[in-house]
Amino acid sequence: MSVVTHRRIDMLLARYAESHRHPLNEAIHCICVPAIVLSLLGLSWAAAPWLALIVVIASLAYYLTLSPAFALGMLAMAGAMLLILSRLPAASVLPASVAIFVASWIGQFVGHKVEGKKPSFFEDLRFLLIGPLFVLSLLYRRWRIPY
């Protein structure tokens, strides 16, 4: 008798993938989701750099409950993004973040128009945090990194 275990992360990624099957939508998400994360960190950074750190720590705590491997990948991504933000002229962070945020969400909705399905977060707000893991899972699968 075989026992099948279903980790919460696997179920969340499977549900997220249901509305992200079209190759163009998936490609758009691979660009726009990290850009949205960068823009949200940028908006937080523009308010106060410590706020961006709190956002990263809180999201990493959630990711750690789902998968240590994903938490590590998100730590690397967030670290790189915070480094980029720290190197930008302070006056450019807010306008750049707003522009990236708006352009990326337009891209997301175009992708879902192509997909013919509404974004997952309309059903469950947790999917706003699962989107980056979906993109990371595509990279992990390509590189054969277990998560």
Image (cartoon, rainbow, N blue to C red):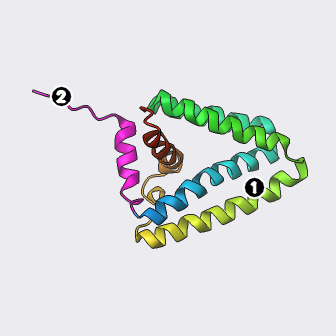
Foreground pick, 146 / 58? 146
| Residue displayed at 47% across by 67% down | 112
93 vs 112: above or below: above
Q: Residues within 10 Å of mark 2 (few under 14, many from 20)?
A: few
Whether residue 61 appears in this view of the structure is no
Question: In the image, 142: left or right of 92?
Answer: left
Question: Between marks 1 and 2, how big is the CA–CA gap?
Answer: 47 Å
Q: Secondary structure at mark 2?
A: loop
User: In the rendered image of this protein, does residue 73 appear above or below residue 112?
Assistant: above
For label 1, count other residues whose C-alpha is less than 10 Å away and answer few (under 14), some (14-19) or many (20+).
Answer: many
Q: Residue at x 63, y 62 (%)?
A: 104
Name the side, left or right, on which 85 lies relative to 102: right
Image position of 13 (left or right of 54):
left
Q: Quadrant of the N terminus?
A: top left
Residue 66 % position (x, y): 44, 33
Q: Which segment did they paint magenta?
A: 1-21
Helix or strand or loop: what does disc 1 sit on? helix
Spot the residue most to the front. 143
Where does the image place residue 41, in percent across and percent down from the top left?
A: 71, 45
Residue ID at (66%, 38%): 78
**Quadrant position of residue 120:** bottom left
Residue 86 appears in view? yes
Give the image location of residue 88, x and y in percent. Answer: 85, 46
Amino acid carrying label 2: it is Val
Query: What residue is shown at x 75% (from left), y 60% (from top)?
Result: 98
Which quarter shows the C terminus? top left
Residue at the spot of label 2: 3
Q: Is residue 4 magenta?
A: yes
How far across and how far down the image is residue 93, in percent?
Answer: 82, 51
Q: Any mark on residue 97, and which?
A: 1
- 139 up-or-down from 58: above or below: below
Q: Earlier in the sequence, mark 1 or mark 2?
A: 2
